[in-house]
Image (tube, rainbow, N blue to C red):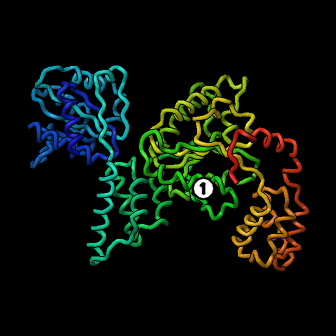
């Protein structure tokens, strides 16, 4: 808070008479302004539509009587004050369309005398009328650093212990550090509220608390729209194969979570056949690293009005930075960035916006893009340096198919060893992971209809009844493999 008081004092020393502070943490803003007023010996008055204009001190006396609840009356009192007092107006934004108030704001802002009062507008969002905007200065409270966030969590843990007869909050250092990192981007009050929620449930901070913490942060920041929060993030135990990709991520986990500067991993692109496990792998990145997973939906991104699509993308990327550290998943990215001449140049502008963000972002946002039709992507996106690596996800081999059968059979409480997964893997040559899952699902449905147990012959029959994409779209698959040769790294 000391730095905030110092920085705000510099703004006042510049003799700006109208200051805008956008913050959800009104209490902390008032504490900061109180500290500034005490340090500089200024009188401090606070206005709200419910309490009117009050002197913020021991007496709390109302200025101007009950009429000061009217913003017009209150601003007239400010305008005619001949002392260098500090006036704070909370939530004036609903009234900023009234002509008299606009003129009063301008009158206050245009006073240049050293004895003239300073007006501070405080709200969660402020947009001044054009005729006043150039007279105002914006100020933002600093967000808590990791050391402050750790102190907040420990304070809440101490309070919980005092309320529970001295019982200690259970956690481990790794989980505690992840919680602190995931609280970044929140105000002091917001971070304290989420830390309290994590602890008060069971007196423990565990890995199971992280997804709910991330969802609560997502909802608090009001990020719904083109971004969606993926609550269910896969574990790598649920992803068959992809050994090279798993090893690559494990080697870079510490660098991303603890890194600084330009050497922090920035993202990967996963290219391959449909149903090969690209989307599941993207989810598993967030699960492995204990980070929130955000999905960018290009279908919601596009808007018929000129410039709105690019604005939507900029807002989505900015909101992703607010959730940092996080994983940003762009599924089937070619559907949003495919080049063409029939869209009025929208795809080119969207591409430019995305490339600029990818090059200039400093927030720890790990981007995972997945694509099926690589030939539809612009070459600017694929050149070296845009992504840390380009992985090709091919159809699984015999060993991987057996592993995938084990995963899906066990998930449905079936015993893989009793069903001969080795034979099932050999019989399903050319199947993708998604097709193998559907074989298991079909066998389960058939067994329920026939009121019998799932057995190997039933699974083999479901395999024979399936025409995999490797046969239906053999030419396209071979073309994709030919393109990937020498251009990508094999994920498996």
Query: Which residue is found at the position 75% from the left and 58% from the top?
Result: 433
* Quadrant where the image shows the C terminus: bottom right
Q: Which residue is nearer to you in this view: 42 or 10?
A: 10
Question: Residue 104: image x %, image y %?
Answer: 25, 24
Q: Is residue 462 left or right of residue 391?
A: right
Question: Residue 301: image x %, image y %?
Answer: 61, 37
Q: Which residue is nearer to you in this view: 433 or 16?
A: 433
The quarter holding residue 151 reads: bottom left
- Residue occupying the far front of the picture: 486
Query: Which residue is found at the position 57% from the left and 53% from the top?
Result: 249
Q: Which residue is nearer to you in this view: 226 or 289?
A: 289
Q: Is residue 436 above or below residue 248?
A: below
Question: Residue 375: image x %, image y %?
Answer: 75, 34
Question: Residue 74: image x %, image y %?
Answer: 21, 33
Instruction: Please tell me how many numbered marks the rendered image carries.
Output: 1
Query: Which residue is found at the position 20% from the left and 31% from the top?
Result: 10
What residue did someone put label 1 on? 247
Q: Is residue 102 left or right of residue 51?
A: right
- Name the element at disc 1: helix
Using the rendered image of the protein, determine whether residue 444 is visible from the camera's viewpoint: no
The local crowd at label 1, few if under 14, some if 14 to 19, many if 20 or more residues have their Cα within 10 Å, is few
């Amino acid at each position: 808070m000391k730095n905030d008081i110092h920085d705000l004092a510099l703004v006042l020393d510049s003799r700006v008479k109208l200051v805008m502070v956008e913050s959800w943490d009104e209490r902390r803003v008032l504490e900061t302004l109180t500290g500034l007023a005490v340090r500089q010996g200024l009188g401090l008055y606070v206005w709200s539509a419910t309490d009117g204009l009050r002197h913020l001190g021991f007496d709390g006396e109302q200025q101007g009587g009950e009429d000061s609840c009217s913003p017009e009356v209150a601003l007239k009192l400010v305008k005619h004050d001949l002392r260098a007092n500090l006036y704070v107006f909370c939530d004036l934004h609903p009234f900023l369309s009234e002509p008299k108030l606009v003129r009063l704001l301008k009158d206050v802002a245009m006073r240049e005398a050293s004895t003239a009062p300073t007006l501070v507008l405080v709200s969660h969002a402020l947009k001044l009328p054009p005729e006043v905007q150039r007279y105002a200065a914006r100020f933002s409270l600093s967000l808590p650093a990791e050391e402050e966030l750790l102190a907040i969590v420990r304070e809440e843990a101490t309070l919980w212990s005092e309320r529970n007869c001295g019982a200690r909050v259970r956690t481990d250092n790794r989980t505690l550090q992840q919680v602190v990192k995931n609280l970044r981007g929140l105000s002091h009050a917001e971070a304290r509220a989420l830390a309290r929620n994590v602890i008060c449930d069971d007196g423990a901070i565990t890995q199971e608390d992280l997804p709910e913490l991330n969802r609560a942060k997502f909802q608090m920041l009001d990020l719904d729209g083109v971004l969606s929060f993926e609550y269910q993030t896969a574990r790598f135990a649920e992803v068959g194969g992809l050994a090279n990709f798993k090893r690559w991520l494990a080697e870079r986990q510490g660098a991303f979570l603890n890194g600084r500067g330009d050497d922090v991993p920035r993202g990967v692109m996963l290219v391959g056949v449909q149903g090969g496990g690209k989307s599941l792998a993207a989810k598993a990145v967030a699960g492995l690293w204990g980070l929130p997973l955000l999905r960018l939906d290009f279908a919601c991104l596009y808007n018929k009005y000129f410039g709105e699509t690019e604005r939507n993308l900029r807002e989505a990327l900015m909101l992703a930075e607010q959730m940092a550290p996080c994983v940003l998943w762009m599924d089937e990215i070619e559907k949003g960035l495919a080049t063409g001449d029939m869209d009025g140049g929208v795809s080119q502008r969207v591409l430019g916006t995305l490339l600029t963000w990818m090059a200039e972002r400093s927030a720890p946002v790990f981007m995972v893009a997945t694509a099926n039709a690589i030939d539809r992507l612009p070459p600017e996106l694929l050149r070296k340096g845009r992504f840390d690596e380009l992985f090709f996800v091919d159809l699984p081999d015999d060993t991987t198919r057996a592993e995938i059968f084990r995963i899906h059979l066990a998930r449905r409480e079936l015993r893989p060893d009793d069903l001969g997964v080795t034979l099932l893997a050999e019989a399903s040559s050319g199947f993708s992971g998604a097709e193998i899952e559907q074989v298991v699902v079909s066998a389960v449905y058939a067994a329920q209809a026939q009121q019998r147990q799932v057995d190997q012959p039933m699974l083999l029959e479901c395999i024979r009844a399936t025409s995999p994409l490797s046969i239906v779209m053999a030419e396209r698959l071979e073309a994709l493999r030919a393109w990937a040769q020498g251009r990508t790294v094999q994920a498996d």
